[in-house]
């Protein structure tokens, strides 16, 4: 049984609007302290810890705008088709770092739907959705890539 139609597959390669974020030394310092970093370059704000980008490009919202898992309700509105399976779970994240994030960096994040495919699981069909977040500087220098896989069941 095939759940993904040509209309679903036509979304592959589409991107959300770019999001621009300016990184401050204070942002890095606050994140470093909140995540109990030990390295001085993180604590001083000279360089951001690797996971600093987690939700950096997400919408800033209040507690009433959060889903039960703590993510913004806008996490449900990324570009992409409405799928015939609607229970989602995380399927993994891959990170590729090209250079450190430093104070004063103006970063641009673009999320793209890069792949969708089906598999048959033990309890029924699964749809795998892979999105890539490409992070560059305002000058176009590649900073990092994050590839997230979600699984619909």
Image (cartoon, grey):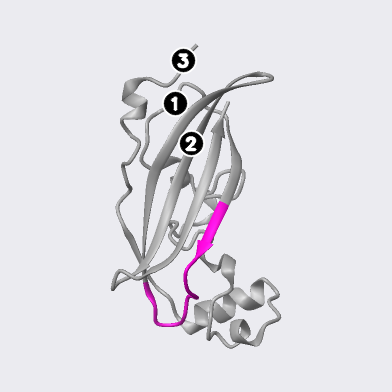
Query: Quick check: is 97 in the magenta stretch?
Result: yes
Image x and y of residue 111, in percent = 39, 51
Which residue occupies the foreground of this view, 84 or 131? 131
Which residue occupies the foreground of this view, 63 or 38? 38
Pair 2/1: label in front: 2
Q: Residues within 10 Å of mark 1 (few under 14, many from 20)?
A: some
* CA distance for labels 1 and 3: 12 Å
Q: Quadrant of residue 113?
A: top left
Check if mark 3's residue and mark 2's residue have beta carbons within 8 Å.
no
Which residue is label 1 attached to? Answer: 83
Q: Quadrant of residue 10?
A: top left
Element at badge 2?
strand
Q: Residue at x 65, y 87 (%)?
A: 40
Image x and y of residue 7, in percent = 31, 24
Q: Residue at x 37, y 47 (%)?
A: 112
Check if mark 2's residue and mark 1's residue have beta carbons within 8 Å.
yes
**Mark sitting earlier along the chain (1/3):** 3
Pair 1/3: label in front: 3
Residue 129, compared with residue 122, is above or below; it is: below
* CA distance for labels 2 and 1: 10 Å
Which residue is label 3 attached to? Answer: 2
Query: Which residues lie in the magenta part?
Result: 94-106
Which residue occupies the foreground of this view, 2 or 35? 2
Q: Residue at x 60, y 40 (%)?
A: 91
Which residue is label 2 attached to? Answer: 129
């Amino acid at each position: 049984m095939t759940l993904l139609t040509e209309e679903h597959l036509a979304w592959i390669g589409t991107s959300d609007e770019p999001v621009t974020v300016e990184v401050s030394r204070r942002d890095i310092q606050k994140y470093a302290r909140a995540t109990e970093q030990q390295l001085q370059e993180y604590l001083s704000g000279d360089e951001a810890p690797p996971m600093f980008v987690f939700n950096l490009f997400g919408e800033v919202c209040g507690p009433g705008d959060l889903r039960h898992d703590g993510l913004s309700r806008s996490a449900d509105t990324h570009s992409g088709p409405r799928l015939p399976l609607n229970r989602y779970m995380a399927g993994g994240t891959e990170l590729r770092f090209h250079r450190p994030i430093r104070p004063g960096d103006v970063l641009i994040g673009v999320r793209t739907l890069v792949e969708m495919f089906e598999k048959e699981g033990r309890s029924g069909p699964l749809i795998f959705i892979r999105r890539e977040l490409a992070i560059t500087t305002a000058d176009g220098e590649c900073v990092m890539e994050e590839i997230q896989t979600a699984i619909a069941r």
